[in-house]
Image (cartoon, rainbow, N blue to C red):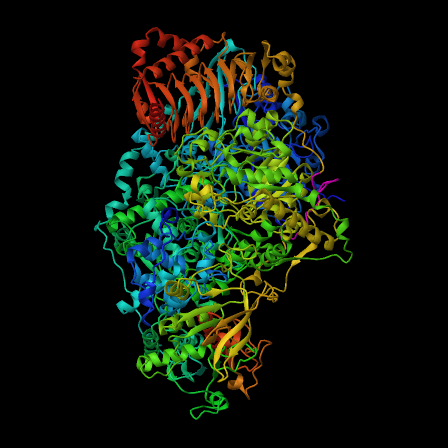
Amino acid sequence: MKRKKLLRIPLKTGLYDPAYEKDSCGVGMVANIKGIPSRQIMEDAYLVNSRMDHRGGCGFEENTGDGAGILVALPHNFCKKIAKEIGIKLPEKGSYAVGNIFLPQDEKERDFCKKEIQNIVTLEGQIFLGWRPVPVDPKKADVGPAAKLSQPVIEQLFVKSAAGIDQDEFERNLYLIRKQFSHRLRTDKNLTQASLLFACSLSSKVIVYKGMLTPTQLFPFFPDLEQKSFETHLAMVHSRFSTNTFPSWDRAQPNRYMCHNGEINTLKGNVNLISARQGVAKSELFGEKLKDLFPIAEPDSSDSGNFDNILEFLMLTGRSLQESIMMMIPEAWQSNTIMNQKKRAFYEYSSSLMEPWDGPASIVFTDGNYIGAVLDRNGLRPSRYYVTKDDKVIMASEVGVLPVDPENVLMKGRLQPGKMFLIDFEEGRMVPDEEIKEKIYKANPYQKWIKEQIVPLEEIVDNKESNPRIADDLISRMQAFGYTVETMQFMLLPIVRELRDPLGSMGNDAALACLSDKPRLIFDYFKQLFAQVTNPAIDSIREEVIMSLECLIGPEGNLLSCLPENAHRLRVKNPIISDAELESLQKIDSHGWKTKTIDITYQKGDGDKKDMLSALDRICQESEQAIEQGFSFVVLSDKKLGPKRIAISSLLACSSVHHHLIRKEKRTRIGIIVETGEAREVHHHCLLIGYGADAINPYLAFESLWQARQDGLLDQISFDEMVQAYKKGVAKGILKVMAKMGISTLQSYKGAQIFEAVGLADEIIEKCFPGTASRVQGVNFDILVNEMERRHELGFPKTNLNNVKVLPNPGDFHWRQGGDSHMWDPETISDLQEAARKNNEDSYWKFANYANKQTTKESTLRGLLKFKYSKTPVELSEVESEKEIVKRFATGAMSLGSISTEAHESLAIAMNKIGGKSNTGEGGEDPIRYKALEGGISKRSAIKQVASGRFGVTMWYLTNSDELQIKIAQGAKPGEGGELPGRKVDDYIAKIRYSTPGVGLISPPPHHDIYSIEDIAQLIHDLKNANREARISVKLVSEIGVGTIAAGVVKAKTDHLVICGHDGGTGASPLTSIKHAGLPWELGIAETHQTLVMNNLRSRVVLQTDGQIKTGRDIAIATLLGAEEYGFATAPLITLGCIMMRKCHLNTCPVGIATQDKELRKKFEGDPEHVINYLFMVAKELRMIMAKLGFRTVNEMVGRVDCLEVDQAIDHWKREGLDFSSILHPAEIIFDNTEVFHTQDQDHGLEKALDHELIKQSKNAIEKAEKVHIDLPVKNINRVVGTMLSNEVSKVWEDKGLPEDTINIKLNGSAGQSLASWLAKGITITLEGDANDYVGKGLSGGKLIVYPPKKSSFKPEENILIGNVALYGATGGEAYFRGVAAERFCVRNSGAKVVIEGIGDHGCEYMTGGRAVILGPVGRNFGAGMSGGMAYVYDPEDNLEQLCNLDTFELEKLEVKEDIDELKLLIENHSTYTDSAVAKKILKDWKRELNLFKKVMPTDYKRVLQEELRKEKKVG
Amino acid sequence: MGKTTGFKEFKRVVEPYRPAKERVLDFKEIYTEHDENGLSTQASRCMDCGVPFCQSNEGCPVYNLIPEWNDLVYQNRWEEAFERLIETNNFPEITGRVCPAVCEGACVLGITETPVAIKNLEAAISDKGLENGWFKAAPPTNRTGKKIAIVGSGPAGLSAAQELNFAGHTVTVYERDDRLGGLMMYGIPNMKLEKSILDFRVEIMEQEGISFFTRTDIGSDNKNSIGIEELSESNDVILLATGATQPRDLPIPNREAEGIHFAMDFLRANTKSLLDSNHKDQNYINAKDKDVIVIGGGDTGTDCIGTALRHGCKSLTNFEILPQPPVERAEDNPWPIFPKTYTVDYGHEESNELFGSDPRVFSISGKKFLKDDRGNLTGIVTVEVDNNFKEISETEKEWKADLIFLAMGFLGPEDYVVKNLQVDLDERSNYKAEHNIHVTSNPKVFAAGDCRRGQSLVVWAINEGRAAAREINNFLS
């Protein structure tokens, strides 16, 4: 097929939308601390970048990179030279600027642009000097065809400063010039190549060279960079890993002042608010000219680009680089009790002006005078540095990128969460974080300012005791606001009783709101988005220290000023406010504040939408007027709802007002408070906040709960206690929803619109929710109004017939007759069971026809499609056989633990029999099952899941797999970890999971070794090393942008990809997530297929989908949309007897499936044959469809959307507006030879592994258990050392491994990531040097020793030795580290014994076994969620307690002899193995030093140990 | 929901009937007083299923909100349970007594355990309603002016009447018998349903504004009759709810012998005499000291047994042509379908108490009646049949009998009502109309209940009445 000419990222087409492109990268810098330029810095920088090649990405063309670049100080000598060549004489350093400008390829357009630029330079009073074409050598650099095709013409612009202005003013002028020409030319409709125009930089201090290149291509491509005279004192480099393969020269980094490894999750909100602040911004430096800088945030720029825009804006309007960075990425100050109060005050003051730009980030920034770096508040990106004795500083995402003589190393450090690293070239020194910040927070009396100016909400509440009131028409109002029996039963009462977002199970099988016959709340049309792969979700439970709901609300000051009045705002700790709080706010007339209440109800009329719409306009107008009238807050209130007044949905009103005010650039001048009877669930509150609400008073929720309490449904608590309980439960829920997207502060979440709409027409989106994706369109205002009115009618009916005195139950969670449609209803369940048990085809057809024609139709998008059968069908006998088709089937990832042994093994047996695959789920597997039974029956799960909890992920487990599945997200609760309630963790389950019996397990929301796209590439590589025969799979969940993420994951070399729908799910999960997170798989699989084909990546991966798949029709549609394998979970469980009890989380499954209760498990009556019978009938149904469509094989059917069309026969009041054109859009082929189903295997690059050498040298050990010694150098590009070897050992010696120290490996140098992952028993690795992230991940019995080079002179216990997330999920073995580890040491350790000399934040988080001995300082949040194993911490300063998260453990003194002996032995080992001075010192005075240790003892672990002791005694 | 682990902790306990020997001496209800605490425990066994099959098409025909009220009873919130109950069921005080509880057959707990005692709970909730005056008339706030005539006052007619009246229409119910209630009045004997409950229900409906005419046989030649055309002209809609009243006969030799009666004749006369005069008028078929045979193993057959026993019959035998059902569900009778298993109903238990054996004889068919020369019945000759009702040779047997009651079901409505009204009948001679649509071939005539679907349960009649009312309301507005 012909490929399209591609200049830039393709426009939005089908489901592909370039707006969702993500990237992540390697960043690095090299500088001379004294500011002395040299050629060496250039050479070093090149090497640094090249050695991080594996962190960058490339697509299907090996030589087309995702982008690489370098930022350096403007090389004066070099500039002089080149200027001379084009006949320009440069003035002195500092009074001229040079910038690299990307220009159109078209000559005419280029000339036009250049002239325009010259004009603007002149208009701004500066002197245009000339243009110099930048020499490029694509041939020498071997630039790939796609990059070449879109390569802009690059020219250098020379500008001279006007006379009499200083360098700062010159920079401001350059800024004005650049902003104006960029904005003008990029939006010029006459230019066909406007998008190519881009100013890489234009500065008198620095210059940026970048392009769509690989790091190694950068220097060869720009001959300038290779010139000897090109010297600099600083260099910042960047290599990009984009999720797309599409050309994008301008998105390469560095940006003008910074480069960024990370992702801004809150971008939409940040950009909206920045544009709103344009309305009130005033600058003394720019005066009237300020407007020429607008829009501050460049449209269609990446998140990093926008960050750069704002940083620049803050800096050039008068703030220092350091202060600007502190404002944009503040530390987690809110809940930090040990932070300096003045610093805290500064942060709080800044928060009154701007919300944080939230998300994982490692940012390197410079203005030429300083170079610095900072990490996000949670340390979600790695960044390590060396300082040498000859004044060089080298910083990068990895260590070892630049060879440094060990003797020359002065110190080794790492960036710490929220901490700043800074070099001051003028002073020629490294400035410590505290010093930088002290200078800033002492610049003004911030403490005084905030004390005087900020008004805490509590202060204005005069009547603290609320008056509980229950009006007579309570039930009517509840009905009118859509309350149901389930609202109370499943949502409100549990929130108050359990203080959390309530749990449910078995996923969501109910109709999408846009297909439902019931009048659904508008909230139901929105789905929460969540972080996956490119960006980690946050653990809001265990890492609560970095989360905050506190906000300052009300009118903001001028962002560009630094005045005390800026802090004059209201401090609200929880966005949910009580009746008393609201009342006080409404009445306020002090502090210069007044509040206006705006009625958001309208007069009941004839049901025409215009009544509602004009009311909506009135509300927006009144809000805007309120600002002009001097009000500081508006309360949008639906209290006037009554028989004659209908409430506009609070969400519609709130978002409309919010966006109206943004458009008018007035949003920051007023606080929006919502007083609503409608919002009550966590999801509702999240939506209101996500669309701009500053505070919410859910008065009807309080009133209803109070009534319930009067009815005896709650304990005898007071009204205030009840309100507090509700607020607490909701707060926890909101934090979790934010954390799902990786957002840690409510301030940033506010207005960030982290939602996708399903089934709302553009007229609604544009008016009320601009910027929100709504890909299938759907209901319009007519229908929305109809729904509002129908709901109102329920509460205030016209006739007695509808006058029901109790709440309705439309069966949203649990099926109800006459309620909302559910795919699993009595008919489907009983017919399927009959079909499967008796292999009864009639019953199957009864089941399938009913499911296909009714329940699926009423509930899902695919229900509305139909096949376009072929005019030339084929005979059924010609179609691929059922036996072949069932091999494409897999059962869902349901862990042993969530389901019973009986159910779990039945699925495995069934799938093994038919050649399909069953999945362990995330709970590990009993090794007994790896051995085949008689008659070829096997209970071994072919797919072994690797999830964030890493339960039972040992080398032996990995070895016993055909597929290794990295679960990034799951349909029922994307962005969260699996939850296994404590009552299901019995002794057996705990043993398999290496955890503590009786203790509930909530897996971390993120994989702590996947915070970015390059990290998943690493984990894929790790697992491939662990088992070369297994294919690696990555499981994602459908949401907007999943296609681009999938493209990134395929570039990260996954073999297999699962796109789950939102609707599946079996085990326990918060109801908010079950119902409101994730999107249908129809969208996900279609988007993924379309995007992969466009990127020519589709052929490298097997694509699977799942989510409520139950019939042959379902899989036929999945195939036509792009899938080639299919997962089933609920349906097979139903064949085994599941009756959708939805009680999995309660351990009371009455049919013995989702329970560990021994009595209930006896009731299991399933049989593997039932599953097999069912799957064969599904395959047969598929074959019949294939025959009619004219396909003989599944492969030829993949992606054939032309065989689908919308079923016009379905008429339904809500469905008319649905638009399937983007789903049914055929995948576009852009590149030559694109294939559209899986045809080729990934190249994992395993041949480069050091392990081949290790295996060769270990031959005798592996075969005969003879001792071997190996000595090798190691570099950072040697990744996963020891893992492939461990796999070989496991194959022979199984889980027993080899005798201790059989294979002895000594390495020298800087080891690459994942050193010694899953190291098997009998292997010892000793590393002299240092190591990167993930050292000893999954350690499976091996031994690991790391110490710094003996020649180095620094103190090991004060220097960083190993990176982040060491020993994550280790299950056994030993490790000794002479030095300090970075963040998240020993997360989820469940068996390894470890000694180390100091660790960063979140140490021993969620540990469930093993021992951690820490002979030095620990960071914050130590031991969060720890429920097993023990830690011994050396704490001479006695400050451990304030660094601990004491939720699950206690600190004890070491008194028990066994403990003391164990500790001593481990320290002695440490001393022997590493020669540790610290160990020696402690041992020398053991008796005294022992008293300085504290024992960290998890409460639950203690209980279990005591129980065991008791049992032993009994037996004894 | 009830108690999370209630179903594991507690066994099913069904409220006992009064002792058989005692209850068989009178026609008072066979039920005992409710034990509130016991019921609360029983309610806690409800698992609050994700998919409650008790509400499915195999479960409760009026889709009672069973999980909801189970939970409320568990929490001792009886009045709210009552509000929930009457939301879906117009006459729970009746169904709680007479329904065979299909819901229990579909109960999910029944898969591995015994089902929740739903029927007892329903009866108890409604009895609490009766005791505490929670049943209240709810007259409509405004009237639409539309008029509807309902023919027949059985459960279909009454439930439709109530719903249509709620909607503000003016409803008149016509009953050919002397008392209202149709089959509920005269088909079901007093010991199963105390008739004052029915009277109370009618009283409420009258307060709500519904008009009732008894002894008004629409379309017949009787003197009180109203012609159907006349009815049609004076109303906007007619709803036929006449029931399926044509009994199935047993046309074998000597059918004319004196002493062979249709079950309904026996039961009606008995209840009427009981209500009129406490049996003093002797105006009923008395089984005292008689050898009685009941043919037909359904509920009506059982009611005949119970009634004959209360008269003091000498012996009692019950024929059933079907084979004896299995104790556990058969292969072809899986959950959630109503279980066809061997159960002992009140009449069987009583007979066993009195005569020492279960009265039922299975797989048996009548060959010919025997009579003496005065034409009085003396017995019946039977033959055993196989599962396909084929006679097995050499199994003939002679039984002595003075009275034989035919309780073999009903064929359809009596069609004189609709003469001249262009209402089509279906192949089973019922009024032809679709379920949940209910309109007949005549656009202003609707049909509901047994006369449309054929002989069925009281709850199905209520289901039909409600559905027809909804359709009529839609038709009128």
Range shown magenta? A1222-1238
Q: Nearer the viewer, residue A1008 or B292?
A: B292
The location of residue B89, given as percent across then percent down, is: 40, 68
- Is A679 left or right of A366, judged from the image as shown? left
Farthest residue toward the bottom? B223
Q: Is residue A1318 among the parts visible in the rendering?
A: yes
The location of residue A253, given as percent across then percent down, is: 57, 32
Q: Quadrant of residue B75?
A: bottom left
Is B458 a magenta residue? no
Q: Which of A793 and A1354 is in front in this view?
A: A793
Count of marks, rendered view: 0
Q: Is residue A238 among the parts visible in the rendering?
A: no
Residue A35 higher or lower than A1153, as above or below: above
- Is B387 left or right of A1493, judged from the image as shown? right
Residue A875 higher or lower than A1469, as above or below: below
Q: What residue do we see at 41% from left, 30% from top? A: A996
